[in-house]
């Protein structure tokens, strides 16, 4: 009915509890600060600046996000494909423990990879990975992430695409050279400014499954 149509949100997702958000933002900022000082990163700084011998302050480079969350279904108020069919009633406002297993940085976005449990995957749309790069086939839930920041002019939708790209490269070369062992985990470089820090200890992040309207 008409009421059903107008009640479809911009998107559904797992919204990190505010205490958790503060913790993750700190971790991410520490990571960006450290990354900025690494010789290996400086060597590839041009990926971010576009010119030789200039510096980048990664914390300034990315605009931090409010309401950290892991989008499950982008509905665009019912205009996105499959928005109306996305059935969610059962777990609405339930609290879940998300597992953040990696941090990644590209010249466009910074985000955290989320490894969903079987139960959480029930909320994951079947077509979320339909835009994987050619030649790759990634399991359901591969795109799950929390956007931590975007460079100027970059839309948040880019974070998931950047993650899929990195995972596709990882699939082609499962044992790429680790650039640096950091306190939090192993840092790998995937060319063209793509960095991934696989966390030694996943970060547990409690999150409320809900929806967002502007
Ligand atoms: P994000 O999940 O990477 O952060 C509102 O724009 C939210 O919906 C953001 O969180 C954004 O990206 C996500 N989003 C926007 N467009 C999208 C799309 N086409 N597919 C999936 N998620 C999208």
Image (cartoon, rainbow, N blue to C red):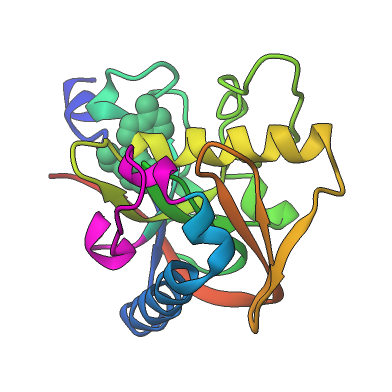
The percent coordinates of residue 124 (x first, y second) are 58, 40
The percent coordinates of residue 202 (x first, y second) are 67, 74
Q: Residue at x 30, y 59 (%)?
A: 55
Q: Quadrant of the C terminus?
A: top left
Q: Which residues are magenta?
A: 45-68
The answer to whether residue 52 is magenta is yes
Q: Is residue 74 visible?
A: no
The percent coordinates of residue 76 (x first, y second) are 26, 28
Q: Quadrant of ligand 1?
A: top left
Q: Image quarter for residue 153?
A: top left
The answer to whether residue 129 is magenta is no
Q: Is residue 214 left or right of residue 93?
A: left
Nearest to the observer: residue 5 or residue 12: 12
Q: Is residue 140 above or below residue 208?
A: above
Q: Quadrant of the N terminus?
A: top left
Q: Is residue 124 above or below residue 203?
A: above
The percent coordinates of residue 83 (x first, y second) are 39, 25
């Amino acid at each position: 009915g008409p009421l059903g149509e107008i009640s479809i949100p911009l998107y559904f997702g797992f919204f990190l509890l505010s205490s958790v958000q503060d913790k993750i933002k700190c971790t991410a900022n520490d990571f960006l600060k450290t990354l900025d000082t690494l010789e290996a990163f400086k060597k590839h700084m041009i990926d971010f600046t576009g010119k030789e011998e200039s510096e980048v302050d990664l914390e300034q480079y990315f605009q931090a996000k409010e309401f950290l969350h892991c989008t499950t279904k982008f509905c665009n108020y019912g205009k996105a494909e499959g928005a109306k069919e996305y059935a969610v009633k059962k777990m609405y406002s339930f609290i879940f423990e998300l597992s953040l297993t990696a941090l990644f940085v590209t010249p466009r976005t910074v985000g955290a990879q989320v490894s969903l449990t079987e139960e959480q995957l029930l909320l994951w749309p079947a077509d979320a990975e339909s835009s994987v790069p050619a030649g790759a086939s990634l399991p359901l839930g591969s795109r799950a992430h929390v956007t931590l920041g975007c460079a100027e002019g970059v839309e948040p939708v880019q974070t998931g695409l950047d993650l899929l790209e990195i995972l596709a490269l990882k699939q082609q070369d499962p044992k790429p050279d680790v650039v640096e062992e950091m306190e939090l985990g192993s840092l790998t470089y995937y060319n063209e400014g793509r960095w991934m820090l696989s966390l030694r200890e996943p970060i547990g992040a409690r999150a409320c499954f809900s929806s967002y309207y502007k």
